[in-house]
Image (cartoon, rainbow, N blue to C red):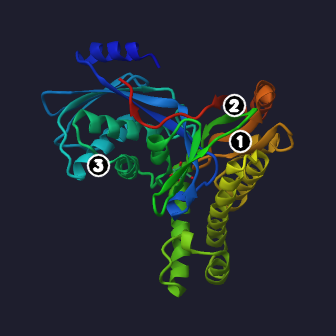
C-alpha cells in the first residue's frame, strides 16, 4: 500500500489530511467453529490488510469513500442506520456500536482501501470493522480498550451484516503479532502468543474463488445446533453453559438419542477443541509433522461431520494429502468456499501452485488463486 498515494487521494476527495490506520486479515492455524462454543482458536494476522484514512468534519455528516467500489456514502452520525451500500455497513455498524456504548462521535470523513481478497475467508470484513473502530477511537480520543475494539467489530457484524460470528476474526485482526500465532481461550478471553517457526516451510493459501450462497445461513444454523446440544445436556447438568463444558460421554448419553445430526455437530466441536490443545503442544515443540496431521483431521471433521466444506475445498485438500512436501492442509474459516491453508516446503511451492491450478481449472472451470502469506502485526496507526 502506497501511503503517499493514499494521503493525496484523501486530500483530493475531502480536502483534509488523514490519520491512517491499518488492520490485517487473518488466517487460522487450527480451531475452527470453536470460538462461539467458548473453545480455543489459534489465528494469526497476515500481511494483507485494510487501510483507512480518517479526519474530523465540522458538521455531523459521515462521508465514506470506498476505493474498491468507487462510491461515496453519506449519512449522519446522529441517525445511523443500514445503508444500501453493503460495504458501508461494516463501517456504519461499528460507529453505531461505539455510540451505543456511550462514547460520543462527531462527523467524519473516511476513505477505505486494502488488499485482503474479498470473500476469500481471510476476514476482510473483520479487518474493516477493526480498522474503523480503532480509527474512530484514535480520532476522537475515546481510549477504548483494545479487546473492546474487537468486541465492537463482532457486534457490528451481528447487527449490520447479519452474521452471528464468533470473536476469532476481530480478535486476530486487533491482536496479531508478527511471526506468531495467538491462542485465545474464547471463554476467559485470555491469550498467549506462540512463535510460528516454520523453518523451510511456508503457509500457502489456495483460494477456491467460490463463496457458496448458503454460507451465512448455514453458519447461523451450525451455531443453533451447538446451542441445542448444550441445552439438552444442561437439563441433566445445570452448570453446563457451552460445549466447552461438555464431554463426549455426556453427548453420547443426552444428545445422541435425541438427534444424530446435532450430536455429530457437537462432537466435532469437542474433538476440535482437544485437537487444538494438542496442536499447540506440537507447535511449541516444533513438531510441524504432527501439527499437519491434525490439520488434515480437522478438515475431515469439518467436511464429514460439521458439513461446512464443499467440493472445491475437498478437492484441494485431497490433492495435496499424499504429497510429502505438504505437511498439512485444511479448509479455513466459516466454510462453503474461501481458502485452504497448507504448510508447504519452500522450494516446492511454485510447482504445487502450477500443478494444482491447471487441475482445478479443468475440474471446476474456475481459476485458483494462491497466496504465500506471512504473519504480521495487528491493528495500528501507521501515519
Ligand atoms: C468465521 C467466523 C468466526 C469463526 C469461523 C469458524 O470466520 O467469523 O468467528 O467462527 O468462521 O471458525
Total number of numbered labels?
Answer: 3
Mark 3 to mark 2 CA distance (whole Å): 39 Å
**Helix, strand or loop for disc 3:** helix
- How packed mark 2 is, by other alpha carbons closer than 10 Å (few <14, some 14-19, many 20 or more), is some
Can you give x and y, in whole percent of width and height, for residue 190 in the image? Answer: 47, 57
Q: Compared to 40, does 161 lie above or below? A: above
Out of 285 and 76, give the one closest to the viewer: 285
Residue at 72%, 50% (x, y): give it.
285
Q: Which residue is mark 3?
A: 97
Q: Who is closer to the viewer here, 359 or 251?
A: 251
For marks 1 and 3 on the same chain, the one whose residue lies earlier in the sequence: 3
12 or 292: nearer the viewer: 292
Up the image or down, 361 lies above or below 175; here it is: above
Query: Residue placed at 51% from the left, 64% from the top?
Result: 38
Residue 349 appears in which quarter of the rendering?
top right
Identify the residue under disc 2.
366
- Taking the image as shown, residue 351 lies to the left or right of residue 192, namely right
Q: Is residue 69 left or right of residue 180?
A: left
Query: Which label's residue is closer to the chain start, 2 or 1?
Result: 1
| Whole-percent x, y for residue 382 in the image | 39, 26
Q: Quadrant of the C terminus?
A: top left
Image coordinates of residue 79 in percent, x first then y, are 18, 43
- Of mark 3 and mark 2, the one earlier in the sequence is 3
Pointer 2 with pointer 1, Cβ within 8 A: yes
Q: Secondary structure at mark 1?
A: helix
Residue 110 appears in view:
yes
Query: What residue is pinned by disc 1?
Result: 312
Amino acid at each position: 500500500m502506497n501511503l503517499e498515494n493514499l494521503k493525496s487521494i484523501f486530500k483530493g476527495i475531502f480536502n483534509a489530511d488523514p490519520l491512517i490506520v491499518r488492520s490485517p486479515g487473518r488466517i487460522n492455524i487450527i480451531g475452527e467453529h470453536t470460538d462461539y462454543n467458548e473453545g480455543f482458536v489459534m489465528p494469526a494476522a497476515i500481511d494483507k490488510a485494510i487501510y483507512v484514512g480518517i479526519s474530523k468534519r465540522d458538521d455531523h455528516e459521515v462521508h465514506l469513500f470506498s476505493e474498491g467500489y468507487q462510491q461515496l456514502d453519506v449519512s449522519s452520525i446522529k441517525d445511523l442506520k443500514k445503508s444500501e451500500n453493503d460495504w458501508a455497513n461494516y463501517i456504519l455498524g461499528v460507529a453505531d456500536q461505539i455510540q451505543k456504548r456511550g462514547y460520543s462521535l462527531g462527523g467524519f470523513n473516511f476513505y477505505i482501501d486494502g488488499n485482503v481478497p474479498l470473500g476469500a475467508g481471510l476476514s476482510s470484513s473483520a479487518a474493516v470493522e477493526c480498522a474503523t473502530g480503532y480509527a474512530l477511537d484514535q480520532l476522537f480520543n475515546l481510549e477504548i480498550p483494545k479487546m473492546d475494539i474487537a468486541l465492537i467489530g463482532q457486534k457490528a457484524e451481528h447487527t449490520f451484516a447479519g452474521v452471528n460470528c464468533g470473536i476469532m476474526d476481530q480478535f486476530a485482526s486487533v491482536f496479531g503479532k508478527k511471526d506468531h500465532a495467538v491462542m485465545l481461550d474464547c471463554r476467559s478471553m485470555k491469550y498467549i502468543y506462540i512463535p510460528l517457526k516454520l523453518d523451510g516451510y511456508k503457509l500457502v493459501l489456495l483460494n477456491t474463488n467460490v463463496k457458496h450462497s448458503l454460507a451465512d445461513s448455514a453458519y447461523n444454523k451450525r451455531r443453533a445446533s451447538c446451542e441445542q446440544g448444550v441445552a439438552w445436556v444442561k437439563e441433566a447438568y445445570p452448570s453446563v453453559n457451552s460445549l466447552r463444558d461438555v464431554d463426549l460421554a455426556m453427548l453420547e448419553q443426552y444428545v445422541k438419542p435425541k438427534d444424530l445430526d446435532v450430536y455429530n455437530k457437537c462432537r466435532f466441536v469437542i474433538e476440535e477443541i482437544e485437537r487444538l490443545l494438542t496442536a499447540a503442544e506440537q507447535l511449541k515443540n516444533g513438531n510441524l509433522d504432527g501439527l499437519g496431521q491434525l490439520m488434515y483431521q480437522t478438515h475431515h471433521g469439518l467436511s464429514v461431520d460439521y458439513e461446512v466444506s464443499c467440493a472445491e475445498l475437498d478437492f484441494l485438500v485431497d490433492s495435496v494429502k499424499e504429497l510429502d512436501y505438504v505437511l498439512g492442509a485444511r479448509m479455513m474459516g466459516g466454510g462453503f468456499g474461501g481458502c485452504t491453508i497448507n504448510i508447504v516446503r519452500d522450494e516446492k511451492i511454485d510447482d504445487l501452485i502450477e500443478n494444482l491450478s491447471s487441475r482445478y481449472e479443468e475440474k471446476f472451470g474456475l481459476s485458483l488463486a494462491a497466496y504465500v502469506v506471512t504473519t504480521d502485526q495487528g491493528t495500528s496507526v501507521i501515519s
